[in-house]
Image (cartoon, grey):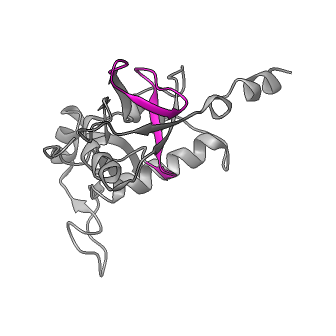
Amino acid sequence: MSKVIQKKHHWIHKVNECAVIRDACGELNVELRGGAENGEFPYIGEVREDAVLYQDGKLCEGELLLEVEGLSVAGLPLYDIYTVMKCCKDPIRLKTVRQGNKLNKDLKRYLNLRFQKSSPDHELQKIIRANLYRHAVPCTTRPPRDGEVPGVDYNFLSEEDFLELEENGTLLEIGTYEGNYYGTPKPPRQPIIGQ
């Protein structure tokens, strides 16, 4: 019985769809925060209710941003999300969800949870990892294998350097396999141009 209740209350059933139109100055009047470069899901910051133009639905501060025009943005840095939004025509369709116990802005925590294969959470983790790997090269303490290119396939690090990255909070995900460390770093920070 508890599984039925859990499924009924799962975040996938609470996704909010919204369509926002730019004002005369080209502004959405919705602030985005977080982003993978900060170790967070992208989420809705301040919504200027006096200025935002909705075609459909509504946004609430703190909601996690899952999609922009059908593109999954979890695991992307904010600068990429702003670039996507800049290329979209009005109205811009967004999918958001309120933060909860399992799904909140903490990307590292979510990536370290275990979910049943093919569940919505497992699929979201796969999307996040794919988006992260577009911007950050994973790192490992194992030696390179034949044909692997340092900085392309992996960043090959000493154990000391790897543990320093973990201690500094640079890694979103870590694991060990056959005595070697593996990790996924946060994407590099870049200035956000033309928010």
Please identify the quarter of the rendering in which residue 11 is found.
Answer: top right
Query: x%, y% of residue 21?
Result: 40, 39
Instruction: Say which residue appears at 30% left-offset and 68% top-offset.
Output: 153
Please identify the quarter of the rendering in which residue 7 is found.
Answer: top right
Please identify the quarter of the rendering in which residue 6 is found.
Answer: top right
Q: Is residue 104 above or below residue 175?
A: above
Between residues 188 and 153, which one lies in front from this camera angle? 188
Do we see residue 178 in this rendering?
Answer: no
Q: Is residue 172 above or below residue 157?
A: above
Magenta region, residue range: 47-72
Instruction: Say which residue appears at 63% left-offset and 28% top-offset.
Output: 14
Query: x%, y% of residue 45?
Result: 33, 24
Do we see residue 42 in this rendering?
Answer: yes
Considering every residue shown, the one lying at the far left of the view is: 191
Q: Image check: 71 left or right of 33? A: right
Is residue 58 inside the magenta stretch? yes
Q: Image check: 87 left or right of 156? A: right
Instruction: Say which residue appears at 44% left-offset and 37% top-offset.
Output: 20
Query: x%, y% of residue 116?
Result: 67, 43
